[in-house]
Amino acid sequence: MEYHLDLDWNDFLQRYWQKRPVIIKHGFKNFIDPISPDELAGLAMESEVDSRLVSHQEGRWQVAHGPFVSYDHLDENNWSLLVQAVDHWHAPSSALMRPFRKLPDWRIDDLMISFSVPGGGVGPHLDQYDVFIIQGTGSRRWRVGEKVLMKQFCPHPDLLQVAPFDAIIDSEMEPGDILYIPPGFPHEGYSLENSLNYSVGLRAPNGRELLNGYADYVLAQELGHQRYSDPDIALREHPAEVLPQEAAILHQMVLELVQQPEHFQSWLGEFISQSRHELDIAPPEPPYQAGEIYDLLQQGECLQRLGGLRVLRIGEQCFVNGELISTEHLQAADALCQHFEVNADMLGEALNDPAFLSLLTALINSGYWYFND
Ligand code: SIN
Ligand code: CO
């Protein structure tokens, strides 16, 4: 299934992206759900899948975490089942993320899907990331407020909410409508009937995460051996004082560690190509021989990328799930980055190089790509 998003991206980026929330009415025409509520409920019974049930009764909120063994205890109203990273576990659902590739892959995180019965929702809250919420089957009333400083509180230890807010958007969404919300705008959605919602979530690291990630790399690579030295040390009156020029040298030592473009790029590729959610890795058993892969591709078989696998390119380097793939065949590596499905044509001459074929074999035997039967 291929989804076509009816959106003027230039206009959207200029007017709304990271600026204002907006409803894209009928973004998907004749919308067909890629998953059923039963299938979603089934996924939330699996131990690897991250899911939660949020319910409320007279202002009291409850949160339960999956995997769930049964749903028999649930009422007809006021609950919502939310499943994270469904694109990792359910290939048809991941098709819903493709139209958003006008935004870069590295900014796109996962597809969260919720099923809500009437009155169901997670309450008024803020998110730190941009999100596109697609209405599937059913309808849901969404309210979005102005971005102002709001105090967050926990009505339940696992639920972060904000106080009621005035709406700048208040709308009943229908199948195929899309609500875009930039970070920090309070919002809440309440189902009017049984309803599926698809949230394409984005990601954006903060400085702390970057520095923390880079520090791990510095340790792993054993960088930063140079030690502070002061052959011209100054005599001082005040022994407790760190002199400004001393602080400046120490500062410079930190900056120099970060200011190494090659190291920075290697680290960034590894860091940014890691998924934040578990992957459904199932290495083929028995593993493939390189020759078999060559033959299958030549026979016209396609290789499918594992759902949620991050394959990114920085300059001339390509990274897969936190690792640099070293190859001289940039064009073939680029095809692996660009396309979710690759065939022999896309890989081209590289297939005739045993080194590339062996790299491809390793990727397939790791479960990162698989043949579509
Ligand atoms: C949802 O309930 O489907 C989305 C929750 C959210 O607003 O992040
Ligand atoms: Co939200």
Image (cartoon, grey):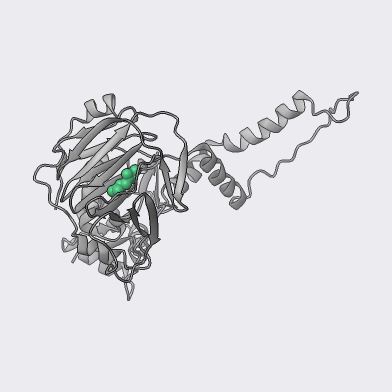
In the image shown, does 179 or 138 lie closer to the viewer?
138
**Residue 281 appears in the rendering:** yes
Look at the image and tell me in which quarter the C terminus lies: bottom left
Q: What residue occupies the far front of the structure in this picture?
A: 58
Where does the image place residue 285, in percent across and percent down from the top left?
32, 75
Tally of numbered discs: 0
Q: Is residue 329 above or below residue 103?
A: below
Q: What residue occupies the far bottom of the structure in this picture?
A: 286
> Residue at position x 26%, y 46% from top?
190
**Residue 263 appears in the rendering:** no
Where does the image place residue 14, in percent across and percent down from the top left?
28, 24
Where does the image place residue 237, in percent across and percent down from the top left?
91, 23
Left or right, 36 with reference to 65: left
In the image shown, does 195 or 328 lie closer to the viewer?
195
In the image shown, does 8 or 104 lie closer to the viewer?
8
- Rendering quarter of residue 352: bottom left
Left or right, 17 with reference to 34: right
Where does the image place residue 347, in percent across and percent down from the top left?
25, 52
Left or right, 249 with reference to 350: right
